[in-house]
Every structure is written in structure tokens, then in C-alpha cells.
Amino acid sequence: MNYFLVKSEPFKYSWEQFEKDKQTFWDGVRNYAARNNLRAMKKGDLVLWYHSNEGMEIVGIAKVSKEAYQDPTTEEEAWVVVDLKPFKKLKKPVSLIQVKSDKRLANMDLVRLGRLSVQTVKENEWNIIMELSDTKL
């Protein structure tokens, strides 16, 4: 299994709205590194949901329900989307401040590549986030 993190501004699309919708496709990615991360996602992979700009915290876990396919919001073939379903809300959100202050997470993409909207998460980083959030799968 692989782990990822996606960023969403809560005023545009929050975790709460995602839970109400029960599924979404992750569209609008126009960065090649983020696109490559979308292409790497496999059905069943787990994805941390990060509220950016407001809140600035990891709040939930989504699951990839459909692998990469053409982004329906553009005719440009370079861009793809994946389908995500809510899996679990974190027991306690994990703030960016917590992530940055934990030396074990110093190399996490969220710290190193702050502007990247779709990121990889290493298994050890995933486990630390689960520990910080008091969340068990």
C-alpha cells in the first residue's frame, strides 16, 4: 500500500463537504509533480486530507476508489484525476505546526515541498501522523 496527502482549502472543499458527498474526483491539478503523484495512486491507497490556508491541519483519511483517468475539466491530455472516498476522520487533527516541530517528520513532503498539492507520504511518516492524531485504522 502507498500513502499520499492532498491539500484542499476548506472554504472551497472541506473534509465535512467531502463526507457529505461520499465521493469526489480530485481535479484541477496543473503541476507535473502533483500529477505524477496522482498517476501513482492505486485503488485502495490511503490519502491524508489536509486543510490548507485555513486551519492548516491534517483532518481525515480518504481512500482511492478509482485510479487515474483523464481530468474531465480539461481537454488537455496531460492532466488526470483520481476518485476518492472518505475513509476516516482523524480523532485529533494534526496541525502543520505539530508536523514541523516533530523532528521525525523533517523530511516529509508537507515540510519540504509546502506548495505541492498532491504529495507522497512514507510509511514511517504515516505511522507518526496516526500516532499524533490518536487514530487507529
Image (cartoon, rainbow, N blue to C red):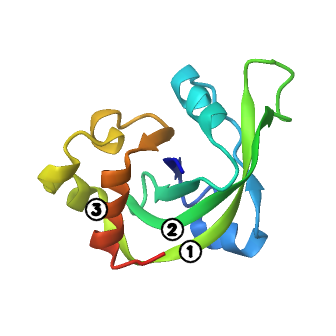
Question: Which comes before the other along the chain, label 1 or label 3?
Answer: 1
Q: Which residue is mark 3?
A: 128
Question: Which comes before the other along the chain, label 2 or label 3?
Answer: 2
Question: Which comes before the other along the chain, label 1 or label 2?
Answer: 2
Q: Are marks 1 and 2 in contact (CB under 8 Å)?
A: yes
Kind of residue at disc 2:
Gly
Q: Which residue is mark 2?
A: 60
Kind of residue at disc 1:
Lys
Give me the residue at 59% from left, 26% from top.
Answer: 36
Query: At which x and y percent is residue 119?
Result: 47, 39
**SS state under label 2:** strand
- Measure the C-alpha gap from mark 2 to mark 3: 14 Å
Q: Which quadrant of the structure image shows residue 72?
A: top right
- Front residue of 96/1: it is 1
- Front residue of 98/11: it is 98
- Measure the C-alpha gap from mark 1 to mark 3: 16 Å
Q: Which residue is mark 1?
A: 88
